[in-house]
Every structure is written in C-alpha cells, then in structure tokens.
Amino acid sequence: MGLLGLTFFVASAGAQQAPKMVRGQVTNEQGAPIPNVQVAVKGTTTGTSTNSEGNYFVRATDDQVLQYRLIGFAPEERLVGQRTVINVQLRRTVTKLNEVVTTALGQTATAREIGTLFTTAPSTCSSPSMSIGG
C-alpha cells in the first residue's frame, strides 16, 4: 500500500467516530440546577433533557455540537470535542410575544323539568247499603 493509500485509509477511519457518552450539568446564572432543559445533538434526532438536578447524559461524537434550550433562557451550543463532561450555564432572557390567543370553553346548562301529571277522577262507584236485621 502506497503512502497515498495509507493517508486515505487513516482519513476515512477518522471520519467514522464512535459515539461516546457525554454528561454534564446545566445551571442558571446563580449556579442553581435547571431541570427539563432540552439537550439535543445538532442535526440529529438524538437528545435528552436534564433531570431535577440539572444533570444530563447523551451519546455524541467529537465533531458534533450539543444544543441546550429551555423557554425563558438564551439557547447555547457547545462542540463536544475531546470532552466527556460539558457543564453549561444558561442566561435568562425576556421573550416578547407578538400575539396572544385566549380561548374559553363555555358550557351551557339547559334546565329541564320532569314532572308527573296526576288527575283525580270522581268515583262513580257507590257502596251498596246494607241493612242488618230486619
């Protein structure tokens, strides 16, 4: 195998990196852990979210980028590189909403009366008179 063939083999072997486990913690500006932050491997469907202590675990290769997102915080991105631990601090942001739509589900109740009609009919039966004795 010539030098050119060996260079091609080494370059192509390096292009197929094995994913490794990357872990870390996401905190706010005061250093408190942030739960439920979405941690995604950019350009893939791989991702996870932080637990109640702000910790996460995700598989990624050295050349991939991790994205950190949560409503109310500025998104962040980090190149994995040689690291297996990536701690991130998210900054709070104010997001202006252009439009707010409010819906309400109204329930209407229909009053229904259920009654019974009683009619008392006069009795046409008469009791026979009986005389006792004679």
Image: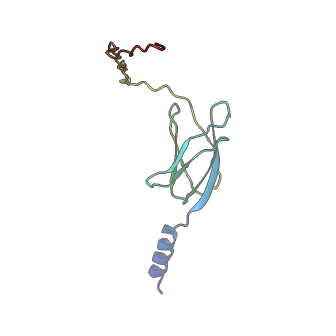
Percent position (x, y) of residue 17? 53, 66
Q: Position of residue 67 (x, y in %)?
A: 51, 46
Out of 128 and 120, give the one closest to the viewer.
128
Relative to 25, does residue 123 appear above or below in the rendering? above
Q: Quadrant of residue 108?
A: top left
- Give 85 or 130, whichever is nearer the viewer: 130
Single out the residue that lies furthest toward the bottom: 1
Query: Going by the image, does 78 lie left or right of 131?
Result: right
What's the residue at 56%, 63% (across, down)? Answer: 19
Q: Residue furthest front?
A: 134
Count the numbered circles shown: 0
Is 73 above or below relative to 40?
above
- Residue 11 position within the rendered picture, expressed as x and y whole percent measured from the top left: 48, 71
- Give the colouring mode of the picture: rainbow
Compared with 30, 14 (above or below) is below
Residue 33 point in image, percent of width and height? 66, 37
Residue at image point 48% right, 76% down:
7
Q: Residue at x 64, y 48 (%)?
A: 24
